[in-house]
Structures are given as C-alpha cells and as structure tokens.
Image (tube, rainbow, N blue to C red):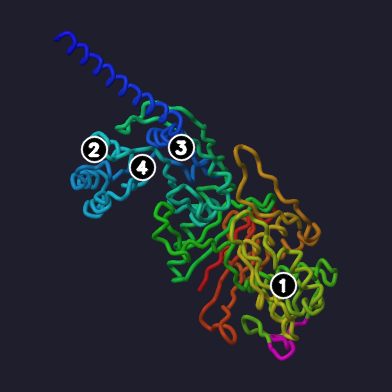
Amino acid sequence: MILRTSNRRIRLLLALSLLVFAGTLARAVWLQGVQAGTLGRIASSQHKVTIEIPAGRGTISDRSGEPLAIGEQATTVYADPRQIREPRRVAIAAAKALDLDANKLYERLADRRRHFIYVKRKADPTQAAALERQRLSGLGFYAEELRTYPQRGVAAHVLGFAGIDNRGLDGLERSLDRLLAGRPGSETIVKDPLGRSIDVIATRAERPGKNVVLTLDHRLQAQAEQVLRDTVRDSRAKAGTALVLDPQTGAVLAMATAPGFDLNRFGKASADRRRNRAVTDTYEPGSTFKLVTVSAALSEKLVSPSSRFTLETSIQVADRVIHEHEPRETQRMTVAQILSQSSNVGTITLAQLLGQPRLVDWIGRFGFGKPSGIDAPGESRGILPSYWSGSTIGNVPIGQGIAVTPIQMAAAYAAIANRGILQTPYLVDRVHGTRQQRRPSRRVVSRTVAAQVMTMLRDVVSAEGGTGALAAVPGYTVAGKTGTAAKPVSGGYSTSKYVASFVGVVPAKKPRLVVLVSIDE
C-alpha cells in the first residue's frame, strides 16, 4: 500500500516536471524565434553606447609659428538625473567643485524626466578630476578640447572665434572651419547593467584638423593695435584701422582695428565691436585717392610730372564751385606739386583732361568697385557712382562721392610701390604645411609711371609745402599721402565729423612696407 502510494507520487512528480519542462522549452523556442529580434534590439540598446570622439581643431599661428588659436584640454561633466538618488547633495558638491550655482543645478538634477544634462561643458580638468574622485552616482566625465587664444586680443578681428562646440563662428575661424575642424571619430562600448564599461567593440579614428599659418607678424600686429588704441583714445575718435602690407607679395603683416576685444571672452563684445573694419567698412578716401587720378593722367600720356598749370584757388564744375583745402593765391603748379601739395583744383583739372570714361576705367584698374580678393570673410566691394552728373567729375577725382575699403586703398598704393604690379592681398600663408596658391598678379601702371608717382609721394613727406611732413621718420625715406574727408550725412556732408587717413611707403627707394592708418571721427 505504501509502495503504491509512493509510486503514484513519483509519477505525479514526473508528470509535473515534464509539464514544466515542456512549458519552459516552448517559452525558450518562442523567445529565440518569435521575439529574438525584438529582445536582441532591446538588449543591444541597453548595453551598447556609441560615443563621439571629437577631432582636435587645427591651430592658427603667425608667420613665425607663434600660436594665435590653440586647443587646450578640458573636461565636460554630464549627469543622468534618473541615476541620481540625492540630487541636492550632488548639486552642492558639483557646484562647489565647478563654480556653479547650486540651486539652479539642483533644479535640473531633480528632473527625473531627463536622462542627460550637461553639468558644465569644458570645465577646468583639475576641478573636474576633484569632483570625479568623489564617485558620485549619476555623473559622467569625458575629455574635450577648449579653443583658446593665448594672445587674447591680438588679431581678434582677423581670427574670429569658435563656439562651445568648436565650430567657427566668425573671422578666419569660420571661413576656414572646414579645414580646421577635422573629422570626429567614435567608439562603441558595451556596458554592464550598472553602466560600467566592460568592452570596446567598434572604433573609428578621428582625423585632426589642419594647422594654418598666417602672414601676420604677431609682434608687428600687437604694436599696430597698441598705437591705434592710443591714437583713437587720445583723439577721442569713434574707431580706427591700421594695415601693413608687403607690396612685393601682397602678404598682410598686420591688420588692426580699434576698439578691440578679448577673444577668450568674445561673448561680451558686441557685433559692432567685433567687425573687421579693414575689409567690411567703406569710407570716402579724400585726398589719398588723388594718386589714382594723377597715375591715370600720366599713364595716358596727357601730362608729365613737370607739366605746369595755372591754377586758381577754386574751380567751377557744373553747378558746383570746389575750393582748395586752404586759401592761396593763383599759382603755377607742376603735376608733381599738384600731388605733393594736394591741390583739389589741380587734380580736377587733370580729371577733366582724362574725361569720365577713362577715369572710370582707371578706377577699376586700381581695383576699386570690386573685392580685392583677400582671403578674409565679409569683404565689401566699395561704392562707385552709378550715375555721373555734371559735377561728379569734380568729386570723384579728389576722393568724394566714392567709398573704398582700407584694404583696397592699401593694395592700390602697394601696386605703385611694387613698380606698378598689383598683388592680391592675402592672410593665409600655409595650410597643413602647404603654401596656398596665390591669385596671379597684374600690372596696373608701367614701371616708369610707378617710379614717377613714387617720387611725387616722397615729395608729399619731404618737399617744402608737402602735406605729409608729419609722417617723416628719422633715418628713413618715407613716401605717402594724407587724406581728410568729411563724412556724408543726409543732404550733404558733415561739418564736424571726418575720416582722417594716411597711406605710407617705407623705405621709399626700395619699398618693403605699405602702411595705412584711418581714424574715424
């Protein structure tokens, strides 16, 4: 009896075991077949994470290799609020370590609807490491590159800046972003249920950005900026621009704008303050433009440097009477004296000999009315008259009724200094060690005319009655031209606001530098 009861229990136990086994087997078959794909995807998403590895941004340096824009090591701190059990404690610790507002951080950490927030982008690595050592759950850390500018404000308007994601936002940083940015890499890692990395299953190497070498000389650039700042401050001017070119190559050695700003704090500078006025802004050049009129008359063989004219103190042009900048008696002047003494009447007389069509042609030959071609973003083409009235021939030849950029004017003088050959100005010398292809040079005037005009420009500085005597530098022969133009206002010209400028060439006999300085108001 006992044996039969025992056998029945054994058979019942076996039957139940077989039933459970069959159910388990069926469940396994269902899981492996019907639901295998779905569960596999869920498991994969829970345990595999692909992380982007930022590519190092290329450096920007001056012609001697002095760094102007570099990448420095930083650490980004992030959090998953759903894994943070004590958001108040974590907020206080992170705020103390990273110099943050604890209350604002707590509000974000306590929001469990979010699974990812930045605690601080590109934090100081030392501060971030101190926080990481506290091993607070829910916080994560990864290395990032912080774009910094070791020279701070030097060449700020030329360089521009990159944003928090290391993408160029302004200046050369923006226009060269494709070259500087490189290509990011990636890592796919497997994590355990606690979020700890246990394996790397796929990688793609990052490709660093290319390094860029500029034509700028950081010492000359810094000096130009300092002198410009002092001049703008002392004269209580609105702004100023300074340029230094190598006339033989077109290389820009300095391009300064005042007021300036600190690139490491670019967010605190207004858009107006960040503007690179050397290429974006136009102004009426005044008497510096007389170089074009005189060069054109000489090139057309209408006059020679010694040709003489009897010039009144004023001249009637259509319905306008144009006076000399300073009263004088009727005077006999050579063409050379017309330029050195900056005679309005004499320059207009030469323009009338040329006539409008030829004058317009020569203005275009010198590069006005179109971009200079410099590799800086935002360049203006300047403004030429769309319609010439009877009096326009009395305005344009003396630099009124026309607007140019500082880089256009500097390039025009550089052509005269370079024996009549105009080189396209440029800022980028090498990319990734390779010299950049230059635009072909072109002849504007003959060597003879260029030499004649250079002699006249020397007289502006050194001859008796020359308007540029203050530009003389002991030990150097300087050539150049001054210009003062009233700013246009509604209905005419201002009687109190002016743009004063000077374009100089040194040394005059064998020119190495062309220097332009323009002071606004």
**Residue under label 1:** 337
Q: Nearer the viewer, residue 347 or 170?
A: 170
Cα–Cα gap, marks 2 and 3: 24 Å
What's the distance in space between the residues labelled 4 and 2, CA to CA? Answer: 15 Å
Q: Which SS does the magenta portion mostly show?
A: strand
Q: What residue type is labelled 2?
A: Leu
Position of 171 relative to 303 (above/below):
above
For the question of whether residue 332 can be seen, the reply is: yes
- The residue tagged 2 is 136
Give the SS element for disc 4: strand
Crowdedness of circle 3 by 10 Å Cα count: few (<14), some, many (20+)?
A: some
Q: Where is residue 43 in the image (x, y as percent from the top left)?
A: 39, 33
Q: Which of marks 2 and 3 is nearer the N terminus?
A: 3
> For the residue marked with disc 3, what is the amino acid?
Ile
Q: Which of marks 4 and 1 is in front?
A: 4
Task: Classify mark 3: helix, strand or loop.
Answer: strand
Query: Does 320 lie within the magenta span?
Result: yes
Question: Which residues, given as a range, are shown in magenta?
Answer: 310-321
| Residue that carries the numbered disc 4 in the rendered image | 76
* Screen quadrant of the N terminus: top left
- For marks 4 and 3, give the CA distance: 13 Å
Secondary structure under tag 1 reads helix
Residue 292 as seen in the image, left or right of residue 136 = right
Q: Which amino acid does label 4 sit on?
A: Thr
Report helix, strand or loop for mark 2. Answer: loop
Badge 2 density bin: few <14, some 14–19, many ≥20, Cα 10 Å: some
Q: Where is residue 355 in the image (x, y as percent from the top left)?
A: 81, 78
